[in-house]
Image (cartoon, helix red, strand yellow):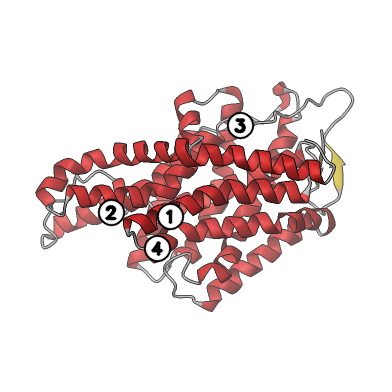
Amino acid sequence: IGRVADSAGGKTKSMTTATTSVSPPRRVRGLDSLRFFAALWVVFAHVAWLPIMVNLDRAEPFERALRGLWGNLFCGVAGVMVFFVISGFCIHYPQVIGKPFHLLPFYTLRFLRIGIPLAAAVGICWVIGYNIRGFSNAILWSLYAELIYYALYPLVLVAIRTIGWKWLLTIAWAGAAFVILQNPSAGDYHVNTVRLTWLLGLRCWLMGCRLAEQVAKEMSLPEADRPTAVNVWPLRGVAWGTSSLANFLRFHSPLGYPWTLNFFAIFAKFWIHQEIRRYAVRPPKRLFEWAGSWSYSIYLVHMPISAVLMKLIGPDPEFYAVAGYALLPLVLLGSYLFFLVVEKPGHWVAREASRAVGRAIGVSF
């Protein structure tokens, strides 16, 4: 089935025994559902939360408080932390369950899969006159970080086998601390630009890789011996509440996202682990798994789509209070069309290119 790194020191040990082990599934259920809700989390934070409070008077203390509470319900960057953990999981899990790792096909697949839709989205922004700098600050910074993580992944595999998880995660913590101390008063997670933001989020991504090993080890046990999930509904509430608190602290205290969201990611890893355990015995809703399959498109183009729609709706608060309710379904529809036209064909191109590179260097998958 493969080999996983021992958490104590990086030594490898087999996940199989002659009598009790089973093969972990090639695909872990529920991750697409989590991606979909993380994407909605970001959309609600950026553009399409219901305009219930739009007509409240900022001059009235009570109404101003209601607007503030409503505005802090969703922290989009916390959704990005969830994406980082899931991304690390999805990148590492195939190798954990025994899929051979080939560097050039891996790079080809991953860079094209993320790069083709990204290039198309930037092109759309250019055509509609959407602010590219604002798009980078809101969305692209996290995708640049992802590309760096993909580039570093071969070194991560070497580090797991040599120095082990304890030291690898300690180094990542030290890197995050270094970034935070460069600008302790920073409010936004990406304020240090891509040059350092990837280092700030590296431990979050590595925790997803570590989770992949833990889940694969559990899935190799007979079903009766696998740990059961705790009740996930309270965990979902805590995830929402703590992310909202991080949002409040970002705008109403000296503690910005760099201080709070890496700790949120620690909880997110635990929460996602429990979700995976739950979905192993209770399959997720097909609707949410389907929607999660195009969640990258939702994340990538919800802002330029909403910018066009907002121009059509207009600035009139009275009109927006009614028309704003159509924003979310229209954003989702536009994102799905982008998936059909750009992301899905891009997946095919990435797979075929990766296979072609594999054939060229004499490996098969």
* Residue 271 occupies quadrant: top right
Query: Callout 4: helix, strand or loop?
Result: helix
Q: Amino acid at mark 4?
A: Ile
Tell which tag, 4 or 2, sits nearer the viewer: 4
Numbered label attached to residue 71: 2
Return the disc, 4 or 3, that comes first in the chain's sequence: 4
Location of mark 1 (residue): 123
In the picture, which quadrant includes the C terminus? top right
From the viewer's perspective, is the residue at label 1 or at label 4 nearer? 1
Secondary element type, mark 3 = helix
Near mark 2 (Cα within 10 A), the count class, few <14, some 14-19 or many ≥20, is some
Sequence-first tag of 1 and 3: 1
Measured in 3D between alpha carbons, the distance from the residue under mark 1 to the one under mark 4, in whole angstroms, is 10 Å
Q: Is residue 280 left or right of residue 159?
A: left
Which marked residue is nearer to the observer: mark 1 or mark 3? Answer: 1
Residue sitting at x 89%, y 25%: 18
The alpha-carbon separation of the residues under discs 2 and 1 comes to 30 Å
Instruction: Provide residue 331's location: percent of width, then percent of height.
Output: 33, 42
Q: Spatial distance from mark 4 to mark 2, Cα to Cα?
A: 24 Å
Q: To which residue does mark 4 refer?
A: 132
User: Is residue 158 at least partly visible in the picture?
Assistant: yes
Disc 1/disc 3 C-alpha distance (Å): 40 Å
